[in-house]
Image (tube, rainbow, N blue to C red):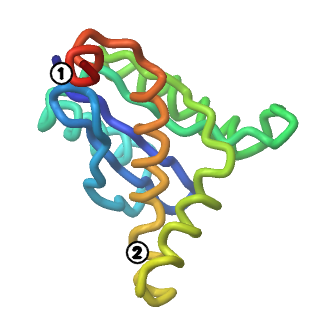
Amino acid sequence: MKRMLGLDYGEKRIGVAVSDELGLMAHPVETYHRRSRAEDIDYVKGLVHTYAIETIAIGLPKHMNGDLGTSAKRVIKFIDELGAKLNVTIVPWDERLTTVMATRILQETTRSRPQRTKVIDQVASVLILQSYLDSLDTPQRDEVDT
């Protein structure tokens, strides 16, 4: 099974997570500081090649009532542009409250605020990808559970 990529796409940064080869666990990779749309797409293309990615789960920041705001529309535009450049499945994934959860997780550690800021996007990408992975019903999961 090929790996999956999780992205927390923000205005300034992209949090990156990748799954293990069985598609069971999400692991943080890094926080990418956005440059231009073309460079951002090239960066993701590099990740797809490096990790042999077949699916990308990108966090879609919906409002609590499910509506799509400005941030969600920005993500959808990025998904469309990325889809035109890559031959992988791209899944917009509901990311409501992932940043809140990531903040809480990091506050429970001994990390200072500047340290949390450096990794919050990675933690959010892990939460997005893990949520997506947990939603899948794969044979590998069934074998591990038994």
> 24 or 58: nearer the eye?
24
Indicate the amino acid at tag 1. Lys
Q: Give the quadrant of residue 82.
A: top left
Image side of residue 67 versus residue 22, left or right:
right
Q: Give the quadrant of residue 145.
A: top left
* Residue with the most extreme top position: 139
Which quadrant of the figure contains the N terminus? top left
- Residue 125 lies, with reference to residue 24, above or below; the image says below
Coordinates of residue 48 in the picture (x, y in percent): 22, 32
Q: Earlier in the sequence, mark 1 or mark 2?
A: 1
- Residue 33 lies, with reference to residue 74, above or below; the image says below
Coordinates of residue 115 in the picture (x, y in percent): 40, 83
Coordinates of residue 50 in the picture (x, y in percent): 12, 37
x 31%, y 42%: residue: 26
> 23 or 145: nearer the eye?
145
Which quadrant of the figure contains the C terminus? top left
Residue that label 2 marks: 118
x 37%, y 46%: residue: 40
Q: CA distance from mark 1 to mark 2?
A: 28 Å
x 58%, y 69%: residue: 104
Residue that label 1 marks: 2
Evaluate if marks 1 and 2 touch, with contact meaning CB atoms under 8 Å apart: no
